[in-house]
Amino acid sequence: MQQQYDVDWKNYFGVIVSFQTPDHGAQGGWFDGGPGVFMDIRHVVGNGTQVWGHEMGHAYGLDHSRADCSNEDYMDPWDMMSTIAAFSTADPLYGMRGPGLNAWNMRGQKWLDESRVWKGTPGKDFNQTIQLRPLHKRGLNGYLAAELPSIGNHSPYLIEFRVKNNWDAEIPAPGIIVHRLGGADENGETADQRSINPINTHSYVMKGTRNQHSLTAGDIFEIGTGPFSRIQVIAIDDVNEIATIQLCYASGSKTKPSVKISFRTQYDHCRPRSVEGATSTFVYKITDLQYACAYRVVWNVIGAVPVAGQKNDGTAFSIVVPDPSVWVKVTIGVFFDDGNSANDVLSFYSISQGTADLLEFICKMLQEKRKPNPWWEWNPAILRTIAARYSKQQLIEAGARAEKLLGNLQKIIEHME
């Protein structure tokens, strides 16, 4: 070239050669110590920017993209470096084009704006909900990608949002894609090959929990059991080109969450909560939930009637308490979107209204007594104040139950003697 045209190709980053006869194929990479691309007329006319983009990617140092757990090339149809089997689209001038590059291939060439990549604080656990813009729509404000910490010998994971537009017009649907970058030990290249092209690494597209590569609303990617990284797609707004995702990372071992049912706390704690004919309300508490994992609950009751009009999947559950002869069992099942589940049971017999009044009476007396005086030295005025809160019939019934209780206590004492 220098002899014929007085041009020293070594003064340029790379050399591109287009052959006008259909017998040279298409190739990109490093030649004679520098990057270059050559291609014959068939690919120039029929595949245009699709093949040129792919082969120039090799010249810049990119390798064929793959799928996780495989060393087969051309396995990422959302990436230009898999154009043999990629979602390419027709181009009115150059035959075919696209798809675009994935985020890891862009990062490898410093084509990814790192100021627009969300990252957690290094070494810290996090649980964060963010919004992503399409990776290749840099004119829109917001994050273009997000990063999750690496697990095992993987690189960090880059999360990107892809939409049906421009070079990505042929992808099946808008979705979230997760990629990692491969290490030299899994590439399959020899040491000599890596020395020729030191940037020679493959990107790997990852699968979600449903064995899918493109994640839509409700889908999850999760890897590791401790530490572990996780993403859940909350929503995809195709019209406004916004994807809402939840990013989680925990450095400790993954725990199985549990749930516990309890009676809803009453303002007057002296009033019993399982009185026949009354309404009792139950709530739940989940423990060992390491991230804001989405879940649904299902309430059920045996031996009592749920309060009419309520749903069985709410934060609380109310029943009409039956008479004391009926055994009541309230259950809850919690089903987490990562496949875990938890359940609990609360069982009881109800108490009669008269017993409830007696228990409440005793509770209030214990609250009012003047410590440390024993009960037989309590001020009668205080007893009268408490008693005034009840009707005469309630006091008679409470007294009768108290006498019965004392009688049973006396029998126990006599038996002990």
Image (spheres, grey):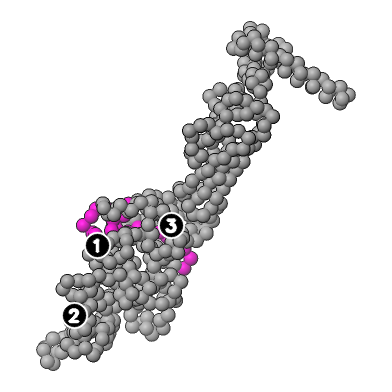
* C-alpha distance separating marks 3 and 2: 41 Å
Residue under label 1, please give it. 165
Identify which residue, 319 or 69, lies in the foreground: 319
What range is drawn magenta here?
Answer: 131-153
Q: Quadrant of the N terminus?
A: bottom left
The quadrant in which the C terminus is found is: top right
In terms of secondary structure, what is the magenta stretch mainly?
Answer: loop
Q: Is residue 172 above or below residue 184?
A: above
**Mark 3 closeness class: few <14, some 14–19, many ≥20 residues within 10 Å:** many
Q: Residue at x 67, y 21 (%)?
A: 355
Q: Amino acid at mark 1?
A: Asn
In percent of width and height, residue 326 lies at 67, 32
Q: Is residue 56 visible?
A: no
Residue under the point 28% across and 60% down: 163
SS type, badge 3: strand
Is tag 2's residue or tag 1's residue first in the polypeptide sequence?
Answer: 2
Residue 220's label in the rendered image is 3
